[in-house]
Image: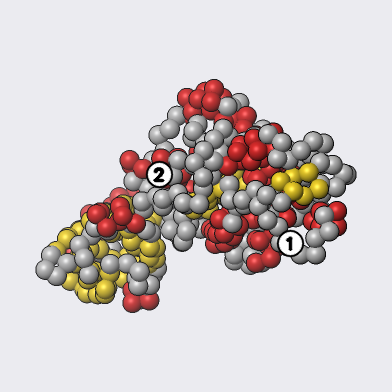
Amino acid sequence: MLKRTLRGAIHGWSVIALTWLISAPMASFAAQPIDSVRLHRAPDHTRIVFDLGAPLEHKLNKLANPDRIVIDLIDADLKFDVSKLDFASSPITNIRVGKHDGNRTRVVFDLKETVRPRTNLLKPIEPFGWRLVLDLFDNQQKSVKSVEPAPHSGSVSPGARPMVVAIDAGHGGEDPGARGPSGVYEKNVVLAISKKLYELMKKEPGIKPVLVRDSDYYVPLAERRKIASERHSADVFISIHADAFTDRNAHGASVFALSNRGATSAQARYLAKIANDSDRIAGVYEEEKDSNGLLSVLAEMTMSGSMTHSLILGRQVIEEMGGVTKLHGNRRKVEQAGFAVLKEPRMVSILVETGFISNREEEKNLNSYRHQEKLARAILNGVNKYFETHPQPGSWYAARRNGSANGEAVAGGPSGGSHRIQSGDTLSSIARRYSVTEVDLRRSNGLSTDMIQVGQVLRIPGS
Ligand SMILES: [Zn+2]
């Protein structure tokens, strides 16, 4: 009853109200404030993101002599001080803001060289509302140079190639990943662990590590696989993440592989969904969206054996991680779910959740240098064990194993025999290989230091 009366009253007034709307100055209801702007520098482009309260109309212009990009934000009022943005490592030399025709805010980017501009209006997705992305792509000739693969190190003898391991720090740039209770971002923690893993792997004679991202910028999920597999011909792909869950008590590390029949647990399904949202959170262009069909990839992975090997590698990594951190659900089992970043049949691929950043204690650990180092070393040890137990033909690991088979490391199996030192061996790698301690190894060979020489034969103490 009341409703009907009200509707009648509104109807009666609507003509007058409309007239007022038209004659009123636009500013009184249309100009939306823009309170925050972010800038992310990637190896080949600069991304500027405007946080919006609602979709926004804009006009983009590229001008030469001198090079500059002009973007007009219609019915917007830029409240953010753009001079605070850090554009030092980008082609931008200055950012200027001006007001034009009442409600038009003009932002001018002065440049030291030409760029290719592109914009993308993004729909709201947690933790963001509407966003306008302005990408300034670098002059191509220059950027191609910077992403060329590094030549293989010259010290490796022919027929003993190093295994290429791609280390993928999850999230980055516009996609922060999970956030801990005291504000630690997943994207920063996983980059720190990835860089430590990279440094450790660089010291391994049988491994050539590459970082999929080495700084705070976003790489689309499909592009991550491509960088690893096509640019670097990686044998192994390791994506590093940290979990978050609504239950703050959830804790422990876990390791995942791609699944061929649904997720192995509700938690695995949930984590895969979160990880797969990354592209939408960071904002990717239509052609960057992941078009790789899961089913065909799974069939190929099963045929090529990379699925089996992903599970073996995962198992060896989680075993090692169990020595330095709690494991989720106390299980040394590799979980499986449809993680988009793992869908590449040419690589043995795993995703490592290093712990729960949503858990106060683990957030603190994940943010500590020492714990990051321990996690990185555990992952390295797992990878090393995998390469040692499943050496790829033609690899450094296979050459070393063949050396052993030819009598250079003699008799007695994994312990109780002897080992002839080869280039790249260290006391600790030998100890690890034969599952003995360095102390025992030194004692049974009368060594007072860690110095060993190529060709020297060490006695391996029996266990
Ligand atoms: Zn993640």
Q: CA distance from mark 2 to mark 1?
A: 38 Å
Report the number of numbered marks. 2
Relative to 185, 411 lies left or right: right
Q: Amino acid at mark 2?
A: Arg
The x and y percentages for residue 244 are 63, 52
Q: Which disc, if any, is residue 450?
A: 1
Q: Is residue 432 above or below residue 365?
A: above
Relative to 313, 443 lies left or right: right
Q: Which residue is mark 2?
A: 231
Quarter of the figure with the C terminus: top right
**Residue at the spot 80% in from the left edge and 64% down from the top edge:** 448
Q: How is the image coloured?
A: secondary structure
Using the image as rendered, state which of residue 279 and residue 444 is in the foreground: 444
**Residue at the spot 17% in from the left edge and 61% down from the top edge:** 62
- Are there few (<14), some (14-19), or many (20+) residues within 10 Å of tag 1? few
Q: Amino acid at mark 1?
A: Asp
